Amino acid sequence: MADANKRFETIIEKLRGNYYKITPQRLAIAEILAKSTGHPSVEDIYGKLRKDHPSMSLATVYRNVMLMKSLGEILELGFPDGSNRYDGNKPYPHPHIICIQCGKIIEPNLTTLQDMTKEVIQKTDFTILTHQLNFSGKCGDCK
Amino acid sequence: MADANKRFETIIEKLRGNYYKITPQRLAIAEILAKSTGHPSVEDIYGKLRKDHPSMSLATVYRNVMLMKSLGEILELGFPDGSNRYDGNKPYPHPHIICIQCGKIIEPNLTTLQDMTKEVIQKTDFTILTHQLNFSGKCGDCK
DNA sequence: AGTTAAATAATACCGATTATCATTTAAGAC
DNA sequence: GTCTTAAATGATAATCGGTATTATTTAACT
């Protein structure tokens, strides 16, 4: 929770530092993203906002999620099924393992990822800016 | 090209083996997927078909691309920008490196990928069925 | 050639996202 | 605290990729 507050402050400071206005809508959206432990979709975020901010427009949620993403403060997860979800806690690329049955997601710490990035740099002439790494399968409970 | 013909035959045999009818539309779609060296979208495939099969419906292209995908004969690539593209040559998961400027795609052979899959299996209780691995950056020509 | 279930063409529909635009408001100047 | 103004918002229309529907056609097997 202390972490979540810090993330929230970081997001707001990034907005302020880029001369974006600090609106109640932005505070509410940033708070949900910073505090959510899962990977909410835009609709999920919109749903959570409805009780405290019943007049908030869905378009505002889309606009601000995109804004925070473009500022590098939240990570967009393009899932194999085509849905987009967001991570406000770890805004840098990291691997996900998704259960195709129950939807559970875990985020393993893979030491070999460093080696692979090195191999890519060594074998190509690309400057790598980001990556996406998802495994799909069945979790222990579902198989 | 010999490879492409072999892939084409493999796809058609897979259809035949599962009692799907061999229609001129399926032959044409399979041919394009087997022979294309890039990563065409459904619209790309539809566009290429229009000259020889002007009456083909876009829905038929969608249906058959999905069918061949479900039979494991083509790979769907969910790109970071949200677009779906297809690979009829290498229907198994493999890494892609995408240039965000010119769109060039290369498919490196990463020896460390085996190690990483092992690490995932060892660190989780998941049965891994597939994966998705894309790097984004700028290629040598674009930077 | 005849039969029949599957496949197709045409198009309506759907859900996620984006664009438009009139109205409201945060932030800085006074 | 009020004023000003550009930015942000709410409401909603438009767009776009993909799916569903349905009448018609056809591949595969008698």
Image: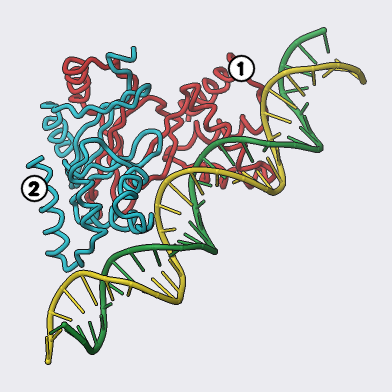
Chain colours: A cyan, B red, C yellow, D green
- Please identify the quadrant where the C terminus of chain A is shown: top left
Frontmost residue, A112 versus A99: A99
The local secondary structure at tag 2 comes to helix
- Please identify the quadrant where the N terminus of chain A is shown: top left
Work out whether B121 lies above or below C16: above
Q: Residue at x 34, y 19 (%)?
A: B129
Circle 2 is placed at which residue position?
Answer: A6
Q: Position of residue C7 (x, y in %)?
A: 67, 28
Q: In the rendered structure, the residue with mark 2 lies on which chain?
A: A
Q: Position of residue A119 (x, y in %)?
A: 15, 33
Circle 1 is placed at which residue position?
Answer: B16
Location of residue B95 (image quadrant): top left
Classify residue A103 as left or right of residue B74: left
Frontmost residue, A63 versus B37: A63
Closest to the camera, between mark 2 and mark 1, is 2
Dot 1 crowding, Cα within 10 Å, few <14, some 14–19, many 20+: few
Frontmost residue, B39 versus A38: A38
Q: Residue at x 50, y 21 (%)?
A: B71
Dot 2 crowding, Cα within 10 Å, few <14, some 14–19, many 20+: some
Q: Position of residue B42 (x, y in %)?
A: 51, 41
Same chain assignment for discs 2 and 1: no
- At label 2, the amino acid type is Lys
Q: Residue at x 49, y 24 (%)?
A: B70
Classify residue B87 as left or right of residue A87: right
Q: CA distance from mark 2 to mark 1?
A: 59 Å
Q: In the rendered structure, the residue with mark 1 lies on which chain?
A: B
- At label 1, the amino acid type is Arg
Q: Which mark is residue A56?
A: none
Q: Residue at x 58, y 15 (%)?
A: B18
Work out whether A18 lies above or below A2: below
Work out whether B53 lies above or below A114: below
